[in-house]
Image: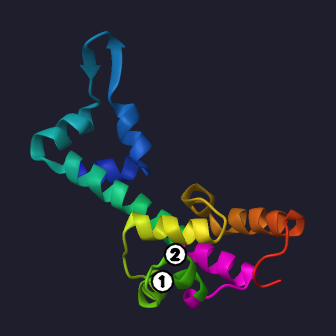
Amino acid sequence: MGASSIGRRNCGTSEFYTKILTQRKPGAVVYRPFVREQLADGTLVTEVRRLIETGATERLRWIRANTKAAMTATGQDAVTISALTGVAVGTVKGFLGNTDTSIKNVLMIAVALGLTVADLERPPKEFAKQLANRHATTQPTLHD
C-alpha cells in the first residue's frame, strides 16, 4: 500500500492533516508514521492541496446555488444585478453557470442581494432555511 493510499484511507478533510502534526513539548513536532512517508516521497503536500481544492470547489458550488436561490427569491435576474453592481450581465450569468470570476464580483453580487459572501457560503439546505426566515421578516424588495 503506497503512502498516498494510506493518507486517503485515514482522512477526509484538511483538518486531519492539521491534527496529525501535534506538539507534545514546545518546539517538538511529532509526525505519525504514514506522514513521515508522505513527507519523504512528496505526497503530503499534494494530498493537502487536493483536499483544499475539493473543499473550495464544494463551497463555490454552494455559493453559486445559493446566489441563484437568492436571486429567485428576490425576483432579481442577471440584468438587475448588473445594473446594481456594474458587473457585466455576461459575467453574472457566467458565474451562475460555472465560469470563475473575481471575488470582488462575487462580493458585489452578494451585496446587491442584501447578503454577504459568508451568508452564501453554507450548504444550500441551510441557506434555504435562512432565506425563508429572512424573506418572511424583511421589507419589500424591488420585485415586491
The disc placed on residue 37 is none
* Position above or below: 101 against 59: below
The disc placed on residue 92 is 1
At horizontal 50% and vertical 72% (from top left) the residue drawn is 61
Whole-number angstrom distance, CA of label 1 to CA of label 2? 10 Å
Q: Secondary structure at mark 1?
A: helix
Measured as percent of width and height from the top left, residue 87 is found at 45, 79
Q: Neighbour class for label 1 at 10 Å: few (<14), some, many (≥20)?
A: many
Q: Is residue 44 visible?
A: yes
Q: Name the residue carrying label 2.
A: 85
Q: Neighbour class for label 2 at 10 Å: few (<14), some, many (≥20)?
A: some
Residue 133 falls within the magenta-colored stretch? no
Display coloring: rainbow
> Which is nearer the eye, 83 or 100?
83
Give the tally of numbered discs: 2
At horizontal 40% and vertical 33% (from top left) the residue drawn is 19
Q: Indicate the amino acid at tag 1.
A: Val
Label 1 with label 2: CB-CB less than 8 Å: yes
| Residue extent of the magenta highlight | 64-79
* Position above or below: 82 against 39: below
| Residue found at the very far top of the displayed protein | 25
Classified by dominant secondary structure, the portion drawn in magenta counts as helix
> Which is nearer the eye, 130 or 46?
130
Q: Indicate the amino acid at tag 2.
A: Thr
> Which is nearer the eye, 27 or 37?
27
Q: Is residue 1 visible?
A: no
